[in-house]
Amino acid sequence: MYKKDNKAKETFGDLKENIGHDNVQMEMYLVAMGHNIRKYHKLKMKQKRRDQEDV
């Protein structure tokens, strides 16, 4: 089993604290941004595996 990394959670928490608790729109932007970063990372890892298989 692996230990879960909480760095992203801390970063979003810090941003939310600095912006204010009631700013729901900003929170949704942060959630969407995290989702898009995760999708981008998954795509890049898939491309990297394909490139390694082609060699």
Image: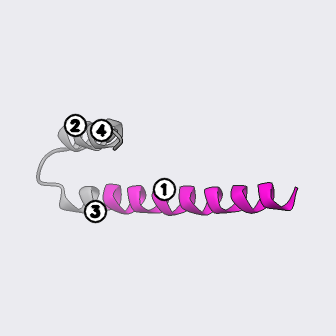
Q: Which mark is residue 28?
A: 3
Q: The C terminus lies in which quarter of the figure?
A: bottom right
Q: Which residue is mark 4?
A: 6
The range drawn in magenta is 29-55
Q: The N terminus lies in which quarter of the figure?
A: top left
**Residue in front for this viewpoint, 38 or 25:** 38
Q: Secondary structure at mark 3?
A: helix
Q: Residue furthest front?
A: 1
Left or right placement of residue 29 versus residue 23 in this view:
right
Q: Is residue 49 magenta?
A: yes
How far, Cα to Cα, is label 3 from label 1?
14 Å
Tell whether label 1 touches label 2 (CB within 8 Å). Answer: no
How far, Cα to Cα, is label 2 from label 1?
22 Å
Under mark 3, the amino acid is Met
Quadrant of the image occupied by residue 40: bottom right
Mark 3 / mark 4, whichever is N-terminal? 4
Q: Which residue is mark 1?
A: 37
Q: Secondary structure at mark 2?
A: helix
Q: Residue at x 85, y 61 (%)?
A: 54
Q: Which mark is residue 18?
A: 2
